[in-house]
Image (spheres, helix red, strand yellow):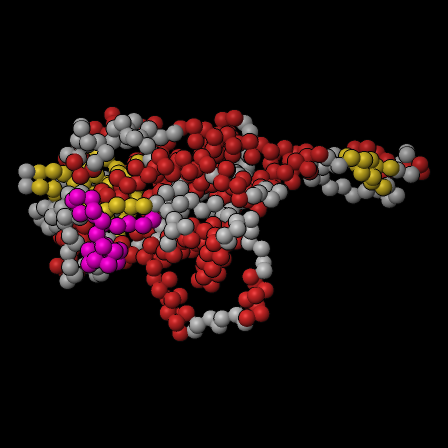
């Protein structure tokens, strides 16, 4: 039996997300996942460039989109710090039961890794959808990230960004569809096959009634303010990818045709009127041609084709492109000179601005994810025999600063000065130095303190201490010397801790 809600959603989505949007999302996904060869072949045949139809069916596919998305995904470069607050906005204690339960549940569910995927897909499509579910096997929540072309919605007119307020929503899975619909008694969820036919009652997660104990645990994550349920995709990305791939393939074709040297064949005078001389005049020329030379004939290279140099340039480009498509750093190939820490920070300024713009959208998405996470967790808690999560708290998130790959010594000294001025603590310094969240930093510092108690560091000999005291500090002109002494002691502690 066909699911009527699904058929209605498909019809409605023809207006809210046109077919060209769906095609653009699909093309971006193919390029990002390394399956853009078919799109590139079509472009080459239309433009009559590079590899022709009927020849090699493995064209060069640009991996620039991977590099672009990786650069734009700045929200979760380092793990974020999450805390619970009450209804008045006051934070709960980090040592409280509710906070520890939230942190443990998120760790069990591997949310930090999922957050990176969310950030990438949001940067790729402009939006993505996160669905949460669970099983009776273990107390954890499973996350599934969907592209917008696999989500069919009938949104609330006033709240199109909140999936929990939709009249109906359907998710296209690997085997069929998951259809959620609002009814007078609450939400229902029905599974269908790929053709939209409902599965038998024994395969329905909530039994014959289909009655779900919570709203659809689906959250929309945006990287800009949505004017409706869907954000229009950037078709210029597809154009850049297709044209860049076409240019690369045309360069390869020109290298194949033109990358040969000009050769002069010098023949002895005694074979001018012989058969060998006629063979020499009629032999084939061009790249890739092999000939048997008559006795005494010598070949001399007059000029090496500049296409060979072009081939090396193209090869370097393809190397960088391939490394980018594999998610590997390309700075070692791209940069031929050293770059200072100030230069790195200046280069990262646009990403800092993007991160600030994303902050509000990330915070809103994390709040909604926590509410959906809690609803699924509390529904399964009796089965798992674990405590339920508190319903009267909300989640706040603090994004970690971007890592500019500064000099370790400079970073340590900067953190030490901040600690000396009480602008940072050992915990916040550890978070930045080790690129971890607050919980991991506290745990690591506790382990270090225990190690120092068990294995204390011997104090330096008096003559060594006097020699160290004579070493000039960065603020030697300061007559008090307080900042130098405080900074030096904290630097030593921090260097020992790291």
Estimate the x, y position of residue 266 in percent, counting from the top left.
Answer: 87, 37
Q: Quadrant of residue 464?
A: bottom right
Residue at the image position 58 percent from the left and 32 percent from the top: 250
Screen quadrant of the N terminus: top left
Estimate the x, y position of residue 433 in percent, counting from the top left.
Answer: 43, 54
- Relative placement, left or right, of 448 versus 162 is right
Q: Which residues are magenta?
A: 80-104
Residue positioned most to the right: 270
Q: Is residue 43 magenta?
A: no
Screen quadrant of the C terminus: bottom left
Q: Is residue 23 above or below residue 420?
A: above
Residue positioned most to the front: 479
Residue positioned most to the left: 185
Q: Is residue 378 above or below residue 252?
A: below
Estimate the x, y position of residue 455 in percent, counting from the top left.
Answer: 43, 73
Estimate the x, y position of residue 347 in percent, counting from the top left.
Answer: 50, 37
Residue at the image position 60 percent from the left and 33 percent from the top: 251
Front position in the image: 484 or 245: 484
- Relative placement, left or right, of 8 versus 283 is left
Residue 395 appears in the picture as rendered: yes
Q: Is residue 87 magenta?
A: yes
Q: Quadrant of residue 190?
A: top left
């Amino acid at each position: 039996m066909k699911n009527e809600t699904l058929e209605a959603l498909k019809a409605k989505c023809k207006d809210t997300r046109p077919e060209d949007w769906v095609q653009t999302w699909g093309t971006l996904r193919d390029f990002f996942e390394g399956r853009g060869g078919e799109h590139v072949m079509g472009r080459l045949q239309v433009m009559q460039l590079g590899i022709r139809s009927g020849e090699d069916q493995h064209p060069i596919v640009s991996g620039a989109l991977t590099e672009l998305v990786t650069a734009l995904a700045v929200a979760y470069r380092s793990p974020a710090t999450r805390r619970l607050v009450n209804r008045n906005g006051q934070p709960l204690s980090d040592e409280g039961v509710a906070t520890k339960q939230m942190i443990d549940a998120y760790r069990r569910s591997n949310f930090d890794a999922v957050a990176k995927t969310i950030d990438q897909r949001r940067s790729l499509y402009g939006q993505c959808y996160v669905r949460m579910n669970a099983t009776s096997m273990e107390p954890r929540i499973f996350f599934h990230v969907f592209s917008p072309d696999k989500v069919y919605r009938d949104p609330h007119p006033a709240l199109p960004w909140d999936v929990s307020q939709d009249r109906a929503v359907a998710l296209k899975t690997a085997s069929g569809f998951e259809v959620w619909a609002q009814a007078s008694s609450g939400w229902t969820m029905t599974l269908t096959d790929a053709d939209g036919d409902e599965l038998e009652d024994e395969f329905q997660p909530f039994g014959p009634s289909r009655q779900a104990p919570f709203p659809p645990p689906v959250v929309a994550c945006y990287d800009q303010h949505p004017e409706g349920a869907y954000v229009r995709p950037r078709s210029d990305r597809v154009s850049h990818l297709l044209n860049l791939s076409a240019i690369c393939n045309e360069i390869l074709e020109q290298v194949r045709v033109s990358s040969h040297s000009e050769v002069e064949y010098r023949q002895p005078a005694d074979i001018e009127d012989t058969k060998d001389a006629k063979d020499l005049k009629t032999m084939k020329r061009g790249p890739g041609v092999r000939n048997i030379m008559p006795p005494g004939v010598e070949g001399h290279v007059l000029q090496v084709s500049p296409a060979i140099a072009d081939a090396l340039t193209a090869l370097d480009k393809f190397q960088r492109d391939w490394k980018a498509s594999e998610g590997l750093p390309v700075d070692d190939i791209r940069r031929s000179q050293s770059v200072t820490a100030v230069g790195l920070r200046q280069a990262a300024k646009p990403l800092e601005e993007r991160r600030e713009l994303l902050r509000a959208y990330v915070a809103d998405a994390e709040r909604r994810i926590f509410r959906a996470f809690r609803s699924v967790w509390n529904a399964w808690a009796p089965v798992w025999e674990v405590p339920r999560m508190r319903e009267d708290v909300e989640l706040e998130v603090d994004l970690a600063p971007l890592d500019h790959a500064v000099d370790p010594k400079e970073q340590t000294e900067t953190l030490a000065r901040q600690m000396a001025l009480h602008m940072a603590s050992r915990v916040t310094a550890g978070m930045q130095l080790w690129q971890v969240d607050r919980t991991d930093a506290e745990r690591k510092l506790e382990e270090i303190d225990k190690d120092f108690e068990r294995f204390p560091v011997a104090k330096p000999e008096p003559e060594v201490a006097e020699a160290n005291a004579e070493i000039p500090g960065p603020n030697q002109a300061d007559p008090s010397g307080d900042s130098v002494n405080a900074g030096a002691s904290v630097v030593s502690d921090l260097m020992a801790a790291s």
